[in-house]
Image (cartoon, grey):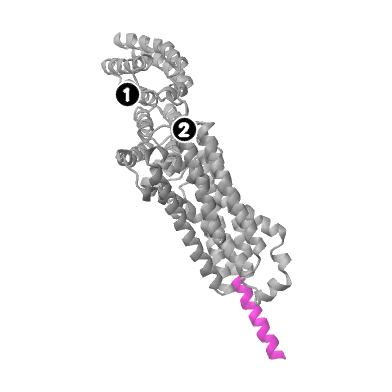
Amino acid sequence: MMIKKMFALSLTLVTLLYIALATPVSTYAASSTATSDVAKAEAFIDQAIKLAGENKLDQAKSSYQKFNDRWYKIEDGVRESSSEAYADIEEKMGQVSFSFMQNKAGSAVNALKSLKAANEKFIDGRYASGNNIKKNVSLTDFIALLTNTKSLIESNNVQEASEKMAEVKSTWLSVEGNVVSKSKSVYDSTERDMVTVSALLKANQPNTDKALKLTNQMINDLKPLAAQKGYSIWDAALIPIREGLEALLVVGALLSFSKKSNRPKARKWIIGGVSTAILASIILALIVTFVFSSISFGDNNFLIVGWTGVIAAAMLLYVSYWLHRQSHISNWTQYIRDKSEAALGTGKMFSFALLAFLAVFREGTETVLFLIGLVQHMTPLNLLLGIGLGLGTLAVIALIYIKIGVRIPMKPFFVLSSLIVFYLCVKFTGSGIHGLQLAGIIPSKVDMSLPSISLLSFYPSWYSAVPQLLLVAGALALIIYTFIKNIKNKAAEQREEIAN
């Protein structure tokens, strides 16, 4: 009954979300301020063309650098006015940087003239207008950003490439829904490699060869996805299934435990946490869509995923340890009867509700944002059918999970639940720290000697690897300690029986 209510609530809220998103929003013309800014900055391009034509490449490069510095201050306005213009100008800027690296006056003049032509095309309003100043960039635009970053790396402009990579990371939120709906493996590798490339470029001795290789790999992985035009019902269904499974494992373990202990009040707390998380996820997604642009919200989304992941991991560690302890209680039924308030008091139930909220909110926010990315690419019926199929599949999995959990004897149930929760603890730790690295809160230093394991959210960075390894080492130490303690206790009991 609880699962059915959760499914109905989720589907109702998502339907309302779709109606809100599908409602046309008023559009805006290209910003006159952006046009004026580009026109003023173009004076530096004219000067650079003149100097390059006179074979004064050092002076020409200095003049172009002034345009480049101005561009970082005005690019947001250009992007809001026309994502097409923004991508084209970015690409032409990459060509200019590459031409200066070649140190050939003729190539520099041609590249600068090409950039000037793109600027004038924007000034004249000949690019397609973004219409909505909050419009998200497309996957093609994102690939153009990566291509520009690649050009900067090739020209050995490490500082500019690093700054451009920061923009790539903040823009990721606009396209990740399109990517994850088509290829989860490409989504995982791209999100991992963005951190790696950023770290390689920021290192004291930048590894441009490796950074270039990874950037090129991201471009090659994403291009086939950009060429795919259609989305099926299954594409929409896979998003809530993929993102919801981990949260389901957490919530399912908590619900199974509350049912085995016959505490319906605990189930209400857990369901309350889940429902609140679903509602909060949708509200946040609506705020991002209508109040912020997803680009400006990019780092904040990484912060949300990062901090909720780290906090949830800490709580999962506690729950895993608690479940592990319960598995060694010889008569658990008698224990829960005698100490029910201690085992599941209000504080414990609130903790379960908070953990359920964090697990669902962490995945729910990204799920809703992913689905927002499909609103303009699918018919309303197909999208809602896909979402319903995904949520329905999750509901069926949840029912099976809980029924199986209830039928498992107490000791194996606690052992299995402890292992599942601990696995999620390790994974949430890695993905949470990775999110904070994407947000720039934790340094993005990497060690390419470390492996990358998506199943465990294990990334080639000691910042995330060390906490995960410590968790595993601590768990093994606890298992060994418990094993030795049990042997000693059994030996003591045997000696006592012999003595009697």
Tell me if residue 302 is in the magenta stretch: no
Check disc 2 and report the residue beneath it.
166
Relative depth, front residue between 266 and 376: 376
Secondary structure, mark 2, is helix
The extreme left residue here reads 106
Q: Between 414 and 496, which is closer to the camera in this rendering?
A: 414
- Which SS class for mark 1? helix
- From the viewer's perspective, tell me whether residue 366 is left or right of residue 147: right
**Residue 128 on image: x %, y %:** 35, 23
Type of amino acid at the residue the image marks with label 2? Ala
Name the residue: 55% across, 65% down: 417
The disc at residue 401 is: none
Number of numbered discs on residues = 2
Residue 259 position (above or below residue 211): below
Categorize mark 1 by other alpha carbons within 10 Å: few (<14), some (14-19), many (20+): many
Residue at the location (37% across, 36% down)?
A: 139
Q: Main secondary structure of the magenta part?
A: helix
Image quadrant of residue 411? bottom right
Q: Which residues are magenta?
A: 482-500
Q: Is residue 333 left or right of residue 176?
A: right
Quarter of the view holding residue 105: top left
Task: Name the residue tied to disc 1.
Answer: 95
Q: Is residue 185 above or below residue 482?
A: above
